[in-house]
Amino acid sequence: MERPVKVACVQVEPVILDREATLDKLEQVASEAAKAGAELVVFPETFVPVYPSSAWAKAFAGWEATGAKETFARLAQESIAVGSPAERRIAAAAQELGIWIVTGVNEVEPERPGTIYNSLLYHSPAGDLALHHRKLVPTNHERLVWGQGDGRGLDAVETGFGRLGGLICWENYMPLARVALYESGVEIYVASTADDGDAWQQTLVHIARESRAYVVAPAHFQQESSYPDDFPLAAEIEGAGTIGRGGSAILAPDGSYLAGPLYDEEGILYAELDPARLLAERQRFDPVGHYSRPDVLQLTVRADGGTTSTRPSAESARP
């Protein structure tokens, strides 16, 4: 890391299945965080326009499930395509506020909008889409909703204060995906999630200790009462109350908590990240530095499903 930085980890509800209203809320929250001094603002997994909770997405498995097709169509219509006016709204917010914004979105391709992807979009203060990652493997019921991602975004991007990258929810359990980030030099690790279980906190502690990076982990928060009255699968969530209770947190490179975890309410967590602390924790363990064996172990990453990159290079692996 080049210098200290204040970051914001956001746990707020989207305006469910309403992309433009959710982007209104994103702009408001990002502005609030920027005024508080945050230079990086991170939103939860598929914040736009909603995370498809298992409470209702399970209905997609039924051939004749009432409301399933209508719900999928609505989710797709309210998703974001890269290069679209909706994606450019996030870019404009980042540029206007002079901050980095990382957003979890349901993504569609404009030329082939039949498949939805779970994506992380990283927008820079210049208004550029600096990094774009699609979740490699949808988890459990998510396979009824999203297509599989590819190797794009298994990298870290330089921000001016540190190298930023991340993974989405349970792909954080994929060891090689984590190593791809470590080899790219990640220092601020985004771990957005919809997992609100207690065990997820153990995962965050492990990631921080293994990566020796700061971990910013926004979690989705949903309430039954926030769903629109015309939600096609309303019967599936009737009486559910809280559907996603959150659990957002920011952790230091030793696995200790700087903020959170936050449950059962909306909020913004803040923390100051100090480069000296990151370096101190790498004295004993650096997963791709002095505690690695590139002469024995190498990782091959196929970006965009085709281009092959071997990290570390063959040259560096020679004894």
Image (cartoon, grey):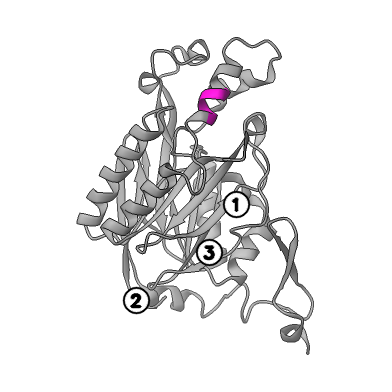
* Residue type of the residue flagged with mark 1: Asn
User: In the drawing, what numbered circle is on residue 209?
Assistant: 3
When the figure is inspected, residue 135 is found, relative to residue 166, above or below; the finding is above
Q: What is the magenta segment's predominant secondary structure? A: helix
Q: Nearer the viewer, residue 22 or 288?
A: 22
Residue 264: in sight, yes or no? no
Outermost residue toward the left in this view: 35
SS category of the residue bearing label 1:
helix
Q: Is residue 295 left or right of residue 237?
A: right
What type is the residue that disc 3 sits on? Arg
Pointer 2 residue: 3
* Residue 313 position in % (x across, y down): 72, 79
- Left or right position of 215 against 70: left
Q: Crowding at label 2, few (<14), some or many (≥20) Cα neighbours within 10 Å?
A: few
Q: Looking at this view, is 240 or 106 the one in front? A: 106
Q: What is the x, y in percent for residue 273? A: 35, 67
Across and down, in percent, residue 287 comes to: 61, 72
Instruction: Report the mark closest to the observer, 3 or 2.
Output: 2
Question: Mark 1 packing: few (<14 Cα in 10 Å), some, or many (20+)?
Answer: many
Mark 3 or mark 2: name the one nearer the start of the chain.
2
**Residue range highlighted in magenta:** 72-76
The secondary structure type at the circle numbered 2 is loop
Q: Is residue 149 left or right of residue 11?
A: right
Please indicate, yes or no, whether residue 2 appears anywhere in the rendered image. yes
